Amino acid sequence: MVISVHATDHTRRYTTGEEIANAVTHGIAALMSIAGLAILVGFAVAYSGSPTVITAVSVFGASMIFLYVASTLYHAIPNPKAKRILQRLDHSMIYVLIAGSYTPFCLVTLEGVTGIALCIAVWAIALAGIALQGVLIKKSKWLNSLLYLAMGWLVILVIEPLIENLANGGLWLLTAGGLSYSLGVIFYIWKSIPYSHAIWHVFVFAGTVLQFLAVLLYVIPVFH
């Protein structure tokens, strides 16, 4: 459930080829996220019918779209003034995706007081992060990254009830998704590698795909 940050300094210089790759990687992710939302909602209606399940997976699916569209626009539009605004939007949508990723597991898998409390907590942190975005960007380029990672790994606080309520396959997918997000940070940090940011984007979307599968197969779930 972990996700981290895109380039935090809008003055970071990419080659034209790199910026095209940055936009294309998450542009493809945005299109796939639209399809993913349709799949999640369709299967939730067909296999569950529960308003809670439908709402929870819709929030997750929408959060995927919001992030990848924001990221694509940020990298695709060269105008410096627009880029500064889009940078803030991009970083804000990362908080939304983290909270959106938690939502199905909180409201459907965990349920009860624990799930609701965690859901409220992650969305409160997300809203606070969005509200403070201007300060966070100016203060430290690492502060957002640390907050994203810390927020993503809050799941450890409810690991026991999660293990009790989520099948092993779902746990493995969830863990693999978190590791993909976290390992991708290596390429985010290692800026001397050509196309490192585009590679980072691939790791981010791979993490989203793994968590999408966890929701589709083990939260809805379509085969039970």
Image (tube, rainbow, N blue to C red):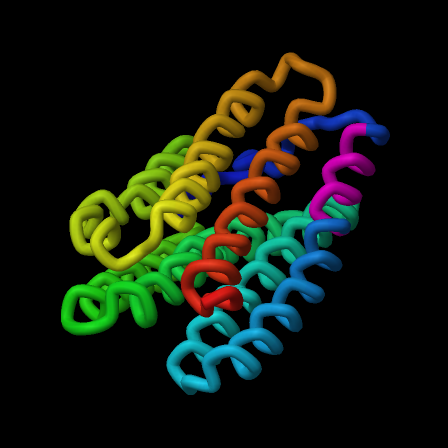
Percent coordinates x, y for residue 79 in the rendering: 77, 48
Quarter-of-image position of residue 193: top right
Magenta part mainly helix, strand or loop? helix
Percent coordinates x, y for residue 80 in the rendering: 71, 45
56 in magenta: no
Percent coordinates x, y for residue 142 in the rendering: 40, 31
Residue occupying the point 70% across, 47% down: 26
Q: Nearer the viewer, residue 68 or 87?
A: 68
Q: Is residue 35 above or below residue 192?
A: below
Residue occupying the point 53% across, 46% down: 210
Q: Nearer the viewer, residue 22 or 83?
A: 22
Residue occupying the point 56% across, 17% down: 190
Q: Nearer the viewer, residue 198 or 166?
A: 166
Percent coordinates x, y for residue 10 in the rendering: 61, 38
Provide the residue span drawn in magenta: 18-27
Residue 112 in view here: yes
Left or right: where does residue 18 sit relative to residue 117? right
